[in-house]
Amino acid sequence: MAAIISAMLLGAFFAVGLLISGMTDPANIKGFLDITGNWRPQLMAVLGAGVVVTWVVYAFARRQSRPMVESVFHWPAATHIDGPLLIGAALFGTGWALAGYCPGPALVAMGSLTPMAIVFVLAMMGGSLAHQAFARHREAAAKTIVSEG
Amino acid sequence: MIDSSWWYSLAGGALIGLASGGLMLLNGRIAGISGVLHIAIGGKGSREEWRWAFLAGLVLTGTIAQLVFPNAISTSRFTPKDVVVTVVAGLLVGFGTRMGGGCTSGHGICGLARFSPRSLVAVLVFLGTGMLVTAIMRMMGGM
């Protein structure tokens, strides 16, 4: 129960940060990406402050034997830089520029009943599950090739 | 309330950092929103309740903000073209974040805070692509 309350409050904190910094307004995102036009560099400050504060809290977390409301830390293990990483990030960047939404701000704006955010989140869920089907298909194809070879 | 001045950006970013760092310190988890959402709606991974709680915190805060500051969040005017562009964009973001293993939160905030080279590459690619696509749209007469 403590884990659920903590996750919910942290989600709310995250959302307040997104609202205050202007990330939930697609016009700000589009302005930030518009380096050849009326560039609005302020989102660099959002990312910079976010990274520095996260780094400080992570440094403190690493000195604990376990998380405060759960039993183990789940640090990511992946370190490889490969084709899917590059292509995936490029596809994400393209969609981000087209709509002015990334996943977090889109969820917050969906909560505010912004029509385009609702459309965006539904399409995003579709895209995310479509990738799962695509990955499974590729895995199966790879297995077939291995067994045939 | 919604202002993109430097102070608001820094304060908002710091709050995002507290929440991302806090999710590791308290729950032992990376605050990667695309991944949290993917697994919550049925994607491969361990489907625990904290995911739904975190997402509910995000969405409900948007609802509360709209009730308290009804004019703060952007307009509801849109054209059929906006709907088409938004659907394409959503599909790309959903597919791309799963293929690349993260979005602005997972790679951008959490990955860079861990000094992950993999995340740094992802951030440079999605920022670069976003800027390139925006520049192309501007050349084509804007969208």
Image (tube, rainbow, N blue to C red):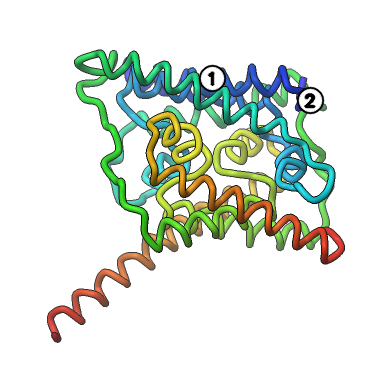
Chain at numbered mark 1? A
> Is B11 placed above or below A82 here?
above
Q: Which mark is residue B33?
A: none
* Image quadrant where residue A69 sits: top left
Task: Name which residue type carries label 1.
Answer: Phe
Left or right for B4, reference A79: right
Tell which of B86 and A145 is nearer to you: A145
- What is the total number of numbered labels drawn onto the structure image? 2
Q: Tell me whether the residue at label 2 lies in contact with that at label 1, contact meaning CB atoms closer than 8 angstroms.
A: no
Chain at numbered mark 2? B
x 77%, y 23%: residue: B5
x 57%, y 31%: residue: B59
Left or right for B87, reference B48: right
Helix, strand or loop for disc 2: loop
Name, please, the residue furthest toward the bottom.
Answer: A148
User: Residue B96: x and y, percent?
Assistant: 49, 57
Q: Which quadrant of the figure contains the C terminus of chain B?
A: bottom right
Left or right for B49, reference A127: left
- The residue at which mark 2 appears reads as B70
Crowd around label 1: few <14 · some 14–19 · many ≥20 (10 Å): many
